[in-house]
Image (cartoon, rainbow, N blue to C red):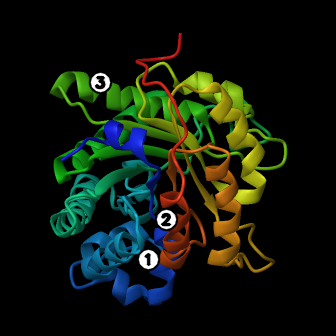
Amino acid sequence: MKGLESILKERILVLDGAMGTMIQAYGFKEDDFRGSRFQEHPSPLQGNNDLLTLTQPEAIKAIHGKYFEAGADIVETNTFSSTSIGMADYQMEDLVYELNYEAASIAKEVADAFTAKEPNKPRFVAGSIGPTNRTASMSPDVNDPGFRAVTFEDLVVAYKEQVEGLVAGGADILLVETVFDTLNAKAALYAIDELKQKNHWEIPIMVSGTITDASGRTLSGQTVEAFAVSVSHIPLLSIGFNCALGADQLYPYLKRLSDLTPFAVSAHPNAGLPNAFGAYDQTAEEMRDLIKNYVDNKLVNIIGGCCGTTPEHIRLIAEVAQQSSPRLYKKVSHVQ
């Protein structure tokens, strides 16, 4: 089977769409989140989507399958919040390794089944590594700007536990995504790098930042260029952007990134901007037309969707991707 690097030189790879949007469609209630295993758990569990890997695994498996059927080459594990920091809200820190291992195993099982049916189109699993709900470079208290809710060292420990579970479960890629504070991302990259050296892993790394608004900066204040430089000190499979903005709003920032980085470029924008009720109204056809601008202008190597996107969005995005050649780039060990 061809490796990711060689495939990226030949065609645009398609990432999946939103996991949360698909989970919401199931309408799971508190009892569904608890399952039989966590009936006596002391804290409320509804909203802990990552826990569904253990309590509703068939639903998670079905979601992965729908995205692969729609044309995705890569699906993300259901582990966006599966660190001890993220699980602390639910008093479930002790489940972190299991959550990541099982999520990767489920996704890998589905990926392998699709690869077996279509050996000429291998499917891959990206271990989703979210930013956590704390920031290492900013204070959550406007009255105490020097305060930090988490340290770099705390994050490294949390990310190591997550990554060990993802890799053991079969993840093919590690995706550090939705980066709003680059110091958090650097902690994740440091944890990954230490584990790679210790265990002699060759697993590729994707990094995806988040431009939060029309200022063109991340939440921690970095421009596109500053963000790219900050995370390019280690070998990356790709660098890109996801979340916060729709494909239209993201375009100028993706263009700047594509012009400057020697790595592959990824994008998985939202289905437009949320409406007054927090829902996403952009249709699959509307998003497809916007993504066509990406591929026509050779901005991306990996394309998918974030909040509000569904298998139908991915199906139309995949059709567009198949009709275009990928952005040309050079594989480099790091940026000088």
Task: Tell me what residue is drawn at x 63 percent, y 31 percent.
Answer: 137
- Quote the CA–CA distance across marks 3 and 1: 35 Å
Q: Residue at label 2?
A: 318
Nearer the camera: disc 3 or disc 2? 2
Task: Tell me what residue is drawn at x 37 percent, y 77 percent.
Answer: 66
Label of residue 44 in the image: 1
- Judge whether residue 271 can be spotted in this image: no
Give whichever of discs 3 and 2 has the lower sequence position. Answer: 3
312 versus 226 height, above or below: below
Quadrant of the rendered structure where residue 31 is?
bottom left
Give whichever of discs 2 and 1 has the lower sequence position. Answer: 1
> Residue type at mark 1?
Pro
Label of residue 194 in the image: 3
Task: Tell me what residue is drawn at x 68 percent, y 44 percent.
Answer: 140
> Residue type at mark 3?
Glu
Front position in the image: 293 or 234: 293
Near mark 1 (Cα within 10 A), the count class, few <14, some 14-19 or many ≥20, is: some
Question: How many marks do you count on the picture?
Answer: 3
> Residue type at mark 2?
Ala
x and y percent of residue 64 in the render?
Answer: 34, 71
